[in-house]
Amino acid sequence: MANNQIIITIFILLQLAFLKANTTTHEVASRYRDDPRDDYPPRDDINTARVVVEGKVYCERCKYGGPWSLSGAQPIEAARVSVICKNYKRRLSYYKTYSTDNDGYFYAELKGFRMSHYLLDHPLQSCRVKLVSSPLDHCNLISNVNNGVGGSPLRFENKVLFRRNTETVIYAAGPLAFRPNDCYAQTAP
């Protein structure tokens, strides 16, 4: 008899907890939106966040050789990289080229990037960074350091900038590198 009362009491408490948790989201959201002290209103859409990709481009040195070595590499100013994103149907959804600064660093804000599927079209799965061109005549062959030929995948390194009414998620790619044209001529016996 006591077991039945305990089971009924637990059943009633679970129903009350379910009803309490089932309050409409409009009531909760309107409470926060109407609060004038709220500097960061809740976002309605995940696509309101800005997406940025950053990385560096180098010129490999012949001395150290190897297709994946960046030992002694020098940054390349005004190198061009492209950010290519494809949707879950493998169709091109975003393409733009960016230039590096005098330290070989690129900061690519993906303006206009949209996700039609929140998991499959996520930048980590759908976007790649490829080398396009180098301004240096002596170092303009694309190397495959960090998949520079096929497209370097993005990494999330826990970089998020919060500003008033905006959120910027920063992904990293690379580092990428070009290699000199005459490495084999210098190392030949």
Image (cartoon, grey):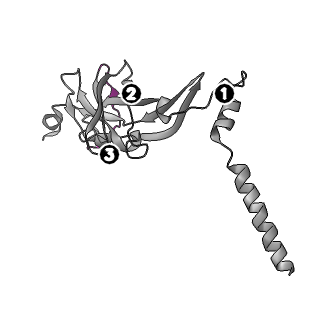
Q: Give left or right: position of 149 versus 49.
A: left
Amino acid type, label 1: Arg
* Cα–Cα span, label 1 and label 2: 28 Å
**On residue 88, which mark appears?**
3
Dot placed on the residue nearer the N-terminal end, 3 or 2: 3
Amino acid type, label 2: Leu
Contact check, label 1 and label 2, Cβ < 8 Å: no
> Quick one: SS at disc 3?
loop
Label 3 Cα neighbours within 10 Å, binned few <14 / some 14-19 / many ≥20: some
* Cα–Cα span, label 3 and label 2: 18 Å
The residue beneath circle 1 is: 33
The range drawn in magenta is 67-78
Instruction: Report if residue 60 is visible in the image.
Output: no
**On residue 189, which mark appears?**
none
Q: Give left or right: position of 163 versus 156.
A: right
**On residue 110, which mark appears?**
2
Viewer-proximal residue, 115 or 180?
A: 115
In the image, residue 185 lies at what x, y percent?
Answer: 13, 35
Amino acid type, label 3: Tyr
In the image, residue 55 lies at what x, y percent?
Answer: 39, 31
Classify the position of the N terminus by image quarter. bottom right
SS majority, magenta: loop
